[in-house]
Amino acid sequence: MTQVAEAYYEVSADWLKATGNGTGEQARVFPVVRSWMAAHLPMVTVKLDDGREWDVIASWRGRYV
């Protein structure tokens, strides 16, 4: 697991709606808490507006910005 300082990850609008973490047609940018590899999948944990942390498969659900 790697701690990341001052990084941001943009989650796609489709994934936000599918998971109930957003509405609308815009992607959202969240601060990155940490990133790591789970087997062959790059993972990222982002901090939501309400303070909760959300684990996302980084290569499928958005992009680092």
Image (spheres, helix red, strand yellow):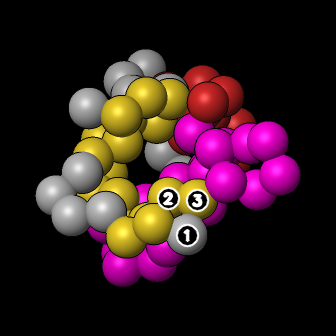
Query: Disc 3 vs disc 1: Cβ atoms closer than 8 Å?
Result: yes
Tag 1 secondary structure:
loop
- The single residue placed furthest to the right in the displayed view is 39
Q: Which mark is residue 49?
A: none
Q: Which residue position is annotated with label 1?
A: 1
Tag 2 secondary structure:
strand
Q: Earlier in the sequence, mark 2 or mark 1?
A: 1
User: The residue under label 1 is which amino acid type?
Assistant: Met
- The single residue placed furthest to the bottom in the displayed view is 51
User: The residue under label 2 is which amino acid type?
Assistant: Ser
Which stretch did the figure color magenta? 37-58
Residue at horizontal 24 percent and vertical 51 percent from the top? 7
Q: Nearer the viewer, residue 63 or 2?
A: 2
- Residue 27 occupies quadrant: top left
Q: In the rendering, at what x and y percent does residue 20 appear?
A: 63, 50
* Residue 29 in view (yes/no): yes
Query: Disc 3 vs disc 2: Cβ atoms closer than 8 Å?
Result: yes
Q: Is residue 46 left or right of residue 65?
A: right
Q: Earlier in the sequence, mark 3 or mark 1?
A: 1
Q: Is residue 53 magenta?
A: yes
Q: Which residue position is annotated with label 3?
A: 36
Q: Is residue 19 left or right of residue 29?
A: right
Q: Which residue position is annotated with label 2?
A: 35
Dot 3 crowding, Cα within 10 Å, few <14, some 14–19, many 20+: some
